[in-house]
Image (cartoon, helix red, strand yellow):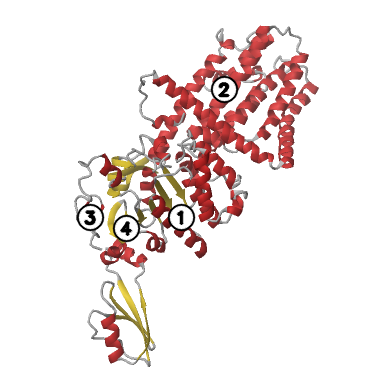
């Protein structure tokens, strides 16, 4: 992806342009995989430390849900949503965010790498910069959040009195997948932004960690402007709020246009295009200014 | 020394040793004479400063200002200048990290900016101040990653690694995480990582910074062997001029983004009007020695006097006259410090 510096793509005799793009994408993923695998191997050298970190990660994320449980000790519904419904929102948000954090969370280190000069080192290797950056310090302990989110989601699914038709299951699966992609794009856009503003990682945290916390609560408890903002500006509402309304069989309490609840895949694709363009622009800017 | 020339008053700095006409020469000449070919290279940065409450003014800074030089294949050249002279910016353009503003740049026939990934397979880069290795991984794992990133055939990789491990004495360190290595060990580890894919060009940015005498000597010996046996082209920046004395016959000096000098090390001393110093111990205190042709007393301290004379002149006639005319007890000769020579060039 970082190879914007290659020559303009010219279709080769064997229909090369598409093949070249595909080849580079495969190489980017392969490079990501072998770098991540090396980090997994190296963390596994210290098993006890890994086990403690994993447990800590699980426990800290579990506290989020404990807060929700305590709230439901006092009330029967939150913004018109029951406990299993809120647990459903919580689980889908936590799993999607956890997966994207596991896969792309390291991309937020752009600012630090620019400051300490190690971005230059990444540029002297024949591997896309984003692959190197995202796979760097690949941390399996982030599985803690995913496991915790999955448990809450499993519990929610068993308590929701819904008929799990094939359509509903497919919608749930696509929610998690598209949610992961959307959060991943937020990580990449945030990383790209740090090429210009090296201290922007806090702003980014507002959208990533802040975003997942937001999505763990029903949209009805928030103001209308906020909901519209996370629908149309930073499209986090497509991670779970909108598709969840369809899965839970609820009417849209937000007064948004019809059909948005099924638009998540299209939104995820759009996010990828935006993130790719932002990343290229950031890297190009870095290479012309050097800081 | 004859190839030394002070650049700046010469319009076109063509290739070394009169290797002009690189333009018209064929591919073979291009590959060898202009293996690294830099012409009229400039890099301008825009620096924005806050000038009022909300106003920001943009000023452009020329970090590199029309530099031209060329390296033959297999040359080992020192690239020196004070901090902020534009050395790092130039190296970054040569490695494809930065885009040049204007000018022409070729490294091993590749345009570094246009074809970064093609270029990086042919170059090795060592940044003295920061490691290219993975901090928490043992050296062995770092090298395994390098092998996969550069897709080095296994046999080739094993052979290169074995050679570096032997020459740089890394055998006991392969299983140690990089963060536990000493500076000298890490530097040897970094150099190995930069050479596993058989680069044609090796850039070294401050390769001996912070190293002890033994590590320095080991690194220098290794670089000499590498250059002699594999013909690797080496461009190194350093603050330690004894690196240059040990390693390079040719130096390129830049300051404030401009090329100041390109030629032999000896010529640099001439260009900087270097002086040697004769330290003379007399039997007793005397007024400053005068009347010796070509020499002048620069300092006296009791019976000891310091006489400066041009670096190019021979010390022998001076010594024989001193011995004949003065109550000489002892004497020693000091070579000019290159730092001073360069400082004089910068000053003038």
Relative to residue A22, is residue B180 drawn left or right?
Answer: right
- Identify the disc placed on residue B8: 3
Q: Are marks 4 and 3 in contact (CB under 8 Å)?
A: no
Q: Which of marks 1 and 3 is in front?
A: 1
Residue found at the very far right of the displayed protein: A73
Q: Which of marks 1 and 2 is in front?
A: 1
* Whether residue A103 can be seen here: yes
* Quarter occupied by the C terminus of chain A: top left
Q: Residue at x 23, y 86 (%)?
A: B291
Residue at image mark 1: B207
Q: Do labels 4 and 3 share a chain?
A: yes
**How far apart in space, not on screen, are marks 2 and 3 (Cα)?**
56 Å
Label 3: how many residues lie within 10 Å, few (<14), some (14-19) or many (20+)?
Answer: few
Residue at image mark 2: A181
**How far apart in space, not on screen, are marks 1 and 3 (Cα)?**
29 Å
Label 4: how many residues lie within 10 Å, few (<14), some (14-19) or many (20+)?
Answer: many
Q: Mark 4 lies on which chain?
A: B
Question: Could you tell me which secondary element the residue under label 3 belongs to?
Answer: loop
**How far apart in space, not on screen, are marks 1 and 2 (Cα)?**
42 Å
Q: In the image, residue A75 lies at what x, y percent?
A: 78, 19
Residue in front for this viewpoint, B205 or A236: B205
Q: In the image, residue B312 lies at what x, y percent?
A: 26, 72
Residue at image mark 4: B250
Q: Which chain carries label 3?
A: B
Relative to residue B263, is residue A166 drawn left or right?
Answer: right
Q: Earlier in the sequence, mark 1 or mark 3?
A: 3
Residue in front for this viewpoint, A57 or B206: B206
Q: Do labels 2 and 3 share a chain?
A: no
Q: Do the residues labelled 2 and 4 touch (CB within 8 Å)?
A: no
Q: Do labels 1 and 2 share a chain?
A: no
């Amino acid at each position: 992806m970082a190879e914007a510096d290659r020559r303009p793509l010219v279709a080769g005799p064997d229909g090369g342009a598409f093949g070249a793009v595909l080849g580079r994408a495969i190489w980017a993923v392969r490079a990501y995989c072998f770098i991540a695998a090396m980090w997994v191997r190296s963390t596994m050298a210290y098993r006890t430390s890994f086990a403690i970190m994993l447990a800590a990660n699980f426990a800290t994320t579990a506290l989020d849900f404990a807060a929700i449980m305590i709230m439901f000790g006092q009330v029967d519904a939150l913004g018109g949503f029951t406990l299993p419904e809120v647990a459903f929102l919580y689980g889908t948000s936590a799993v999607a965010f956890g997966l994207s954090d596991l896969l792309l969370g390291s991309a937020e280190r752009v600012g630090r790498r620019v400051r300490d000069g190690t971005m230059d080192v990444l540029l002297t290797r024949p591997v896309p910069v984003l692959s190197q950056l995202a796979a760097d310090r690949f941390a399996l302990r982030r599985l803690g959040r995913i496991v915790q989110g999955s448990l809450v989601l499993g519990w929610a699914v068993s308590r929701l009195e819904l008929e799990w038709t094939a359509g509903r299951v497919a919608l749930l699966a696509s929610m998690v997948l598209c949610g992961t992609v959307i959060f991943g794009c937020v990580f990449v856009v945030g990383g790209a932004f740090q090429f210009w503003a090296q201290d922007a990682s806090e702003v980014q945290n507002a959208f990533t960690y802040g975003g997942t916390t937001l999505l763990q609560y029903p949209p009805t408890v928030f103001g209308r402007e906020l909901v519209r903002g996370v629908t149309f500006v930073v499209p986090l509402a497509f991670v779970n709020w909108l598709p969840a309304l369809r899965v839970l069989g609820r009417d849209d309490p937000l007064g948004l246009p019809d059909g948005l609840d099924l638009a998540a895949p299209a939104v995820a694709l759009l996010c990828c295009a935006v993130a790719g363009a932002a990343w290229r622009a950031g890297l190009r800017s870095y290479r012309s200014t050097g800081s | 020394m004859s190839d030394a020339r002070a650049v700046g008053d010469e319009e076109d700095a063509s290739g070394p040793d009169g290797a002009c006409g690189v333009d018209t020469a064929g591919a073979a000449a291009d590959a060898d004479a202009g293996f690294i070919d830099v012409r009229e290279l400039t890099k301008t940065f825009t620096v924005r400063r806050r000038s009022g409450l909300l106003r920001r003014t943009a000023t452009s800074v020329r970090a590199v200002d029309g530099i031209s030089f060329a390296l033959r294949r297999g040359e080992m050249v020192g690239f020196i200048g004070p901090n902020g002279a534009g050395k790092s910016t130039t190296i970054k353009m040569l490695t494809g990290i930065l885009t040049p503003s204007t000018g022409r740049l070729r490294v091993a026939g590749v345009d570094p900016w246009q074809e970064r990934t093609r270029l990086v397979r042919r170059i090795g880069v060592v940044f003295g101040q920061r490691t290219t290795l993975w901090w928490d991984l043992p050296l062995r794992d770092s090298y395994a990653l390098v092998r996969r990133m550069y897709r080095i055939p296994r046999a080739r990789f094993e052979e290169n690694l074995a050679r570096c491990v032997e020459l740089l004495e890394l055998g006991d360190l392969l299983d140690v995480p990089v963060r536990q290595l000493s500076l000298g060990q890490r530097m040897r580890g970094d150099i190995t990582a930069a050479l596993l894919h058989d680069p044609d060009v090796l850039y070294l940015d401050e390769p001996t910074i912070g190293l002890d005498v033994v590590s320095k000597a080991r690194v220098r010996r290794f670089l000499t062997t590498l250059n002699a046996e594999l013909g690797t082209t080496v461009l190194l920046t350093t603050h330690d001029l004894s690196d240059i004395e040990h390693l390079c016959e040719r130096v390129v000096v830049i300051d404030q983004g401009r090329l100041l000098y390109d030629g032999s090390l000896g010529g640099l001393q001439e260009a900087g009007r270097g002086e040697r110093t004769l330290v003379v111990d007399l039997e007793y205190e005397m007024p400053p020695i005068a009347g010796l042709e070509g020499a002048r007393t620069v300092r006296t301290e009791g019976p000891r006097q310091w006489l400066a004379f041009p670096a190019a002149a021979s010390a022998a006639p001076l010594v024989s006259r001193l011995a004949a005319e003065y109550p000489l007890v002892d004497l020693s000769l000091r070579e000019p410090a290159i730092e001073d020579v360069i400082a004089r060039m910068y000053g003038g």
